[in-house]
Amino acid sequence: MAADEIEAGVFKALADPTRRQILQDLKAGELSAGEIVDQFSISAPSISRHLGVLRSAGLVRERREGNRIYYSLVEERLALCVGGFLSTVCPDQLVLRRRRPSQPKAAT
């Protein structure tokens, strides 16, 4: 699979708000499929399809334990893909961000 196809899969996965919420939920740690389903008001098969898209994009990994499936975030995949895209599209932004003087803190 070409790098462009891989990147396209990641951005397709990120395009949906349900999938973005799943990724945010997984930031706290591994969750079972049932725990993920419980966070949403949509059907379990719909969540399963969303998890499949995230898995295909390489943004989550699954681990089976008995009859349960656990999902966890593949943080480095997201960081590398989005970071690579941003450095291509706006390479100066990273430099500007580092050079920006820190704001003085308000007195308390």
Image (spheres, rainbow, N blue to C red):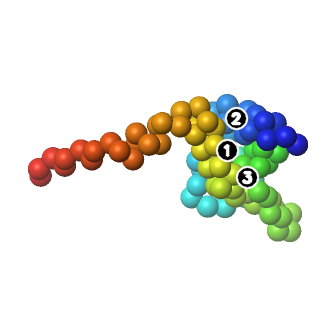
Please give the residue where the numbered disc 3 appears in the rendered image.
60
Q: Which amino acid does label 2 sit on?
A: Phe
- Evaluate if marks 2 and 1 touch, with contact meaning CB atoms under 8 Å apart: yes
At x 12%, y 52%, the residue is 108
Q: Is residue 25 left or right of residue 100?
A: right
Q: Earlier in the sequence, mark 3 or mark 1?
A: 3
Residue 9's x, y, as percent?
77, 37
Residue 71 image-quadrant placement: bottom right
Q: How far apart are marks 2 and 1 (CA)?
A: 9 Å
Residue 54's x, y, as percent?
75, 44
Q: Is residue 26 above or below residue 43?
A: below
Q: In this view, does 103 lie to the left or right of 87?
A: left
Q: Which of marks 2 and 1 is nearer the N terminus?
A: 2
Which SS class for mark 1? helix
Residue furthest left as drawn: 107
- Mark 3 burial class by Cα count in 10 Å: few <14, some 14-19, many 20+: many
| Number of the front mark, 3 or 1 | 1
Q: Is residue 39 left or right of residue 105?
A: right
Location of the N terminus by quadrant is: top right
At x 19%, y 49%, the residue is 105
Please give the residue where the numbered disc 1 appears in the rendered image.
81
Residue 47 image-quadrant placement: top right
Please give the residue where the numbered disc 2 appears in the rendered image.
11
At x 24%, y 44%, the residue is 103
